[in-house]
């Protein structure tokens, strides 16, 4: 059974339960969310054994976070930090067609991740390490932890997956670009939207391939996706759906692609699965709740998941 390890910050998530601004919301639904743990849940549901590592506060939100992830079957390596709180994000739907997310993570427990938090053998014993561009921008210590994790994976011959996942609230493009480029060039697979890849520099795709990256996966949302390798480009269309909540769709896409990659599927099959997982994630509110199981994915692809229509 393939195994994946990932590390980063997961936060408590409070979202409005009706359309409208937070300033008028009468109630909030409480949950959790984080790019790395979203991918971990998606992989676990698709049959890939996955381990998540991160810091949480010594508080009820941290306890809830750990319980939720363990409830999904993940191997959870939570470092309880009694000197900082669990981070929080608030999500609203100002209109039926829009979603806005507000982060409260400055000085959070998750931002205090360090190289010493990552145990010996944890990365070396995995089949793949997945990281994102969020964690390196949280703090100097978190940046060092990600760089060290990637270097350890390289030394052990473990493939590295990197999702750019740029958050402008964490750093300006001028600051973030070189940091994220440094991680991306050491990855095996790099995921990102066109704008995120452009952040890495001119001719980002060609430059990454020249640096040793094997696959650059370009996420195009409802328009599908493409994979660029040294031998050419493979493209796949998206699905026509009626989206309810698009937050987390990119993470579901990554989970779908990685699961197929680890199973040895060809690029076209991997893109089909990734696009389907991304579309399914948009059908239910929440960052990871709609991540499909293998059976749900198969039903969707057969046309039983809300009558998706291929473009």
Image (cartoon, rainbow, N blue to C red):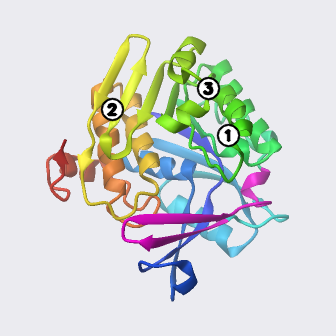
Q: Position of residue 81 (x, y in %)?
A: 79, 61
In the image, taking residue 6 as reference, residue 106 lies left or right, namely right
Residue 173, numbered label: 1
> Is residue 193 in sight in this rendering?
no
Q: Which residue is mark 2?
A: 270
Q: Which residue is mark 3?
A: 201
Residue 244, numbered label: none
Q: CA distance from mark 2 to mark 3?
A: 27 Å
Who comes first in sequence, dot 2 or dot 3?
A: 3
Residue at the spot x=54%, y=59% of the render?
A: 70
Q: Position of residue 202 (x, y in %)?
A: 58, 22
Look at the picture and state if 38 lies above or below 179: below
Position of the C terminus by quadrant: top left
Residue at the spot x=61%, y=28% of the render?
A: 184
Q: Are marks 3 and 1 in contact (CB under 8 Å)?
A: no
Q: Are marks 1 and 2 in contact (CB under 8 Å)?
A: no
> Is residue 310 in sight in this rendering?
yes
Magenta portion: prevailing SS class: strand
Mark 1 or 2: the one toward you: 1
In the image, taking residue 180 as reference, residue 30 lies left or right, namely left
Residue at the spot x=55%, y=37% of the render?
A: 196
Check disc 3 and report its element: helix, strand or loop.
loop
- Depth check: 29 or 125 in front? 29
Residue at the spot x=44%, y=11% of the render?
A: 230
The magenta stretch is 88-112
Mark 2 or 3: the one toward you: 3
Q: Position of residue 277 (x, y in %)?
A: 34, 47
Who comes first in sequence, dot 1 or dot 2?
A: 1
């Amino acid at each position: 059974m393939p195994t994946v390890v990932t590390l980063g910050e997961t936060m408590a998530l409070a979202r409005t339960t009706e359309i409208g601004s937070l300033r008028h919301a009468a109630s909030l639904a409480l949950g959790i969310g984080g790019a790395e743990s979203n991918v971990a849940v998606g992989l676990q549901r698709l049959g890939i054994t996955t381990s998540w590592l991160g810091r949480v506060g010594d508080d009820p939100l941290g306890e809830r976070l750990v319980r939720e992830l363990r409830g999904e079957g993940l191997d959870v390596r939570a470092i309880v930090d009694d000197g900082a709180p669990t981070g929080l994000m608030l999500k609203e739907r100002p209109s039926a067609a829009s979603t806005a997310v507000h982060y409260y993570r400055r000085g959070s427990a998750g931002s205090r991740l360090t190289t010493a938090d990552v145990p010996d053998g944890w990365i070396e014993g995995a089949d793949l390490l997945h990281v994102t561009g969020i964690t390196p921008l949280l703090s100097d210590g978190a940046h060092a932890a990600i760089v060290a994790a990637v270097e350890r994976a390289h030394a052990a011959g473990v493939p590295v997956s990197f999702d750019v996942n740029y958050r402008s609230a964490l750093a300006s493009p001028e600051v973030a670009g070189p940091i994220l480029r440094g991680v991306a060039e050491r990855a095996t697979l790099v995921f990102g939207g066109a704008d995120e890849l452009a952040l890495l520099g001119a001719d980002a795709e060609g430059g990454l391939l020249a640096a040793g990256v094997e696959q650059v996966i370009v996420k195009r949302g409802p328009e599908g996706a493409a994979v660029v390798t040294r031998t050419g480009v493979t493209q796949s269309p998206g699905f026509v759906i009626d989206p309810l909540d698009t937050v987390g769709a990119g993470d579901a896409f990554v989970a779908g692609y990685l699961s197929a990659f680890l199973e040895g599927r060809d690029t076209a099959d991997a893109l089909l699965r990734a696009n389907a997982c991304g579309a399914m994630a948009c059908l239910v509110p929440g960052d990871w709740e709609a991540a499909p199981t293998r059976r749900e994915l198969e039903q969707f692809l057969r046309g039983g998941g809300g009558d998706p229509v291929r473009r």
